[in-house]
Image: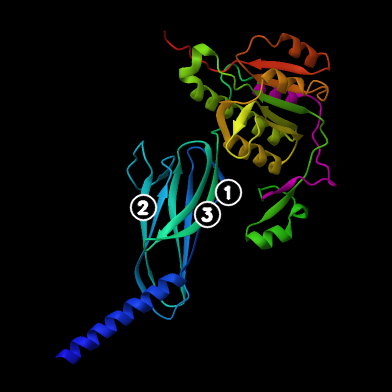
Amino acid sequence: MNIGILVIAVIAVAFFVLRRAGLNRIVYQRYFSQQGVFEGETVMLVEEIQNPYFMPLFAVNVDAYLYNELHLAESPYFSTGMQEFTSRFFLAPYTQVRRSIPIKCLKRGYYELDSVYVQNKSREAKARLFVYPRALPYEESNPMETEMQNLDQSNRRLLQDPFSFSGVREYQQGDPFRSINYKATAKTGALKVNERDFFSSRSFMIYIDFHAPPNAMLHYAETMEKSLSYAADMVWKSIQQGYNVGFAANCQKLLGKENHIRHPMRRGQEHYIEILQEMASIRISEGCSFRWLLHQDIDTLWNVDIYIMTANDNLDDIIAALRSKGNHVTILTPDLEVDDD
């Protein structure tokens, strides 16, 4: 009887020792299925866990925390605190398991996940995601849309430059076969084509003023988010038409210590994604002086369509200087709501 108990005890100890050794060898990583998505869209958080051990590992728990703005699609929503969730895996010997968790992106921003707990032991497991502002057309007669329509009706033709290269994109019906990028197609497993620049010299520059008027502080964040959505739509329309487009704002950033953002005017899908990523990482607070930001560009902008989103009515001298260079300047007033006294 004593020998039987001893044998059982030895087997139990050996099991737990071997299990612990197996747990220490587990390889775990996670990543988002896309580098960036728009606010309101759903993205997959992909978990990959590998058991390189000869012993099966049952009921392996991976505990993690997630920002509320990245909402677990199948869970109830709570407006405060972090979301805690557990992924449980059953791992056969020498196997890898991949699991995808749907995440609904509720708010623009830059999000970085750092670590998880595998059986209560901390592991580094970094994953990052850009959530771009939702693109919205400007509501007051949509001057950008009007401008685009006027250009479409003009006699100017937009021809692709066969010797230029501005990035790689998904194949669309009607794309010529000579534009297929075979290297990118083989790498991704999806049909990719080269994107070419256009011969048109049309250029747009979009500015957002993050200065908060004293009588509108209560609705400041909401107003700035909406301004970013307008700007995202305007940048997209310019890119679609093959025009040069740039973006600048006097804001602070989540990434880096700069007190403003400035993207020079360029074309192409890659440039568009770079601007969206900058928009995602914006901190809703004023950085540098907006007058200073505009003043830096007076001598560099010529014959450009400039759109300025600002509630500042004390920019007449700078606007006159910009117009003296042949620029067409349009002031767009943000949807500011005045706070009640």
Sequence-wise, which precedes: disc 3 or disc 1? 1
| Magenta-highlighted residues | 144-170
Q: Which residue is mark 3?
A: 126
Rounded to the nearest angstrom, the CA distance separating label 3 from label 1 is: 13 Å
* Residue under label 2: 85
Describe the element under mark 3 as helix, strand or loop. Answer: strand
The three-letter code of the residue at mark 1 reads: Gln
Which image quarter is the C terminus in?
top left
Where does label 1 land, which residue? 35
51 to the left or right of 290? left
For disc 1, the neighbor class at 10 Å (few under 14, some 14 to 19, many from 20) is some
Work out whether residue 31 can be spotted.
no
Q: Is residue 314 above or below residue 25?
A: above
Residue drawn at x 84%, y 17% is 325
Q: Residue furthest left?
A: 1
80 lies left or right of 269: left
> Mark 2 is on which residue type?
Phe
Q: What kind of element bears circle 1? A: loop
